[in-house]
Image (cartoon, rainbow, N blue to C red):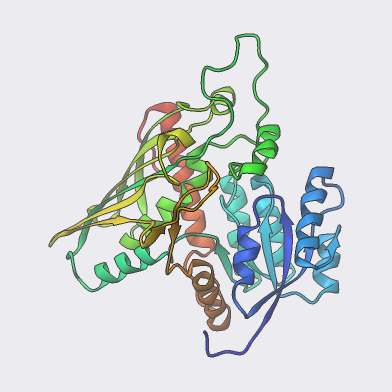
Amino acid sequence: MTNSSSSYRCAVISVVKHAYVPNGVESHPQFELVVVADDADQPDWVHERNQKYADEDNIPYVRDVEKAIADYDVQVGIVSSEAERHCDLSVRCAQAGLHVVQDKPMSTGLSECDRVVEAVTANNVQFMMWNRNFLPALLQTRDAIQNGAIGDVTSMHVDFYFSKDAGPPKGSRGPNDPPIDWLERQKEAHADGSDGGVGKKAMGELEIEGIYPLAYIRMLTGAEVERVFTRAASHFHQANVDNDVDDLATVTLEMENNIAGTLCIGRIGAASHPDIGEIKIHVLGTEGGLVISEARPEVRVYYKDQPAKEFPSRRVAADLNYLLMEDFAKSIESGSPGVLDATASRAICRTVAAAIESGKTGEVVEPIR
């Protein structure tokens, strides 16, 4: 718990994806959800999801973002809309003087990220991109590196495979079948939690989930990415094939201080892995190395009539949500950047953009500064 007794009233600014971000914010006692808000001109399915969340949390839903901010005396905006709306809503929150917690990805366009950085800076508010950096395994790894356990970091590799499906498998549709509509597929996927790329613009795994492994690399090395080379494919899922976005990729990073980074990322299908997927981190240093399973510590739970699709592994000792919000509260109170602020989030977004370009062109790409 922070030493401050300050509390923060929060507006949930659209909640069309899964509710893990506002629920995570609410897990910390200094943050209270008081209203859900969105623009009146949004389609019915957006209003339905917003209303459902508001009803479940017993708070009002207001179809006017600026009115909700003004009427409910809020200090924090939580943005969990479709990806292409993330930055616009975050900018509007910042311009209204709100601190911002935003779902990933930061945006589907780098220029939109620039708008957020400018708005956050101009209005002297704090920003946090939701992330997984405070999972126990990551914190232990960070501490080991900072304590000199492996000397200076020279290279790092992350496997980040989600064993989730994304609709029909590749090759399952006939030659005369129409292409799968990305947004309609994401709306359908909401029921089983596989709708990571909600929005009209199709997104591959690099764009949807790339923030997580890249945030690990950034936190553990402290280095900026200078050059990127990617191999990407639509290997598993027909929706990705039809929309020309990756579901499997390898990325090589040249970073500051002669540090090399690599990552493998993919949505590899439920049949490919007995658990949520393979997420593992390898770090080499001048004096040794580390291999970290992101899910540890964990236990496996089995019981009578257990649903076939339920993952038996359960993470334990993981206070991720609380720790993220504890860090955010401290950043608000100190005025200092937190774990993944707007500038750092924009840096990751530019790396993702360079990786996508490299995957399409087959060339090494320098991320836009």
Q: Position of residue 251 (x, y in %)?
A: 36, 39
- Foreground: 295 or 39? 295
- Residue 227 relative to residue 243: left or right: left
Residue at the (67%, 41%) spot, across then down: 199
- Residue 340 relative to residue 47: left or right: left
Q: Is residue 220 visible to us here?
A: yes
Residue at the (49%, 46%) spot, across then down: 209
Q: Is residue 360 above or below residue 155?
A: above
Residue at the (66%, 52%) spot, across then down: 86
Residue sitting farthest toward the front: 304
Q: Is residue 134 above or below residue 50?
A: below
- Foreground: 369 or 23? 23
Q: Position of residue 90 (x, y in %)?
A: 67, 59
Residue sitting farthest toward the top: 176
Q: Is residue 51 above or below residue 238?
A: below
Q: Position of residue 364 (x, y in %)?
A: 35, 35
Q: Is residue 368 visible to us here?
A: no
- Foreground: 163 or 234? 163
Residue at the (55%, 47%) spot, across then down: 305
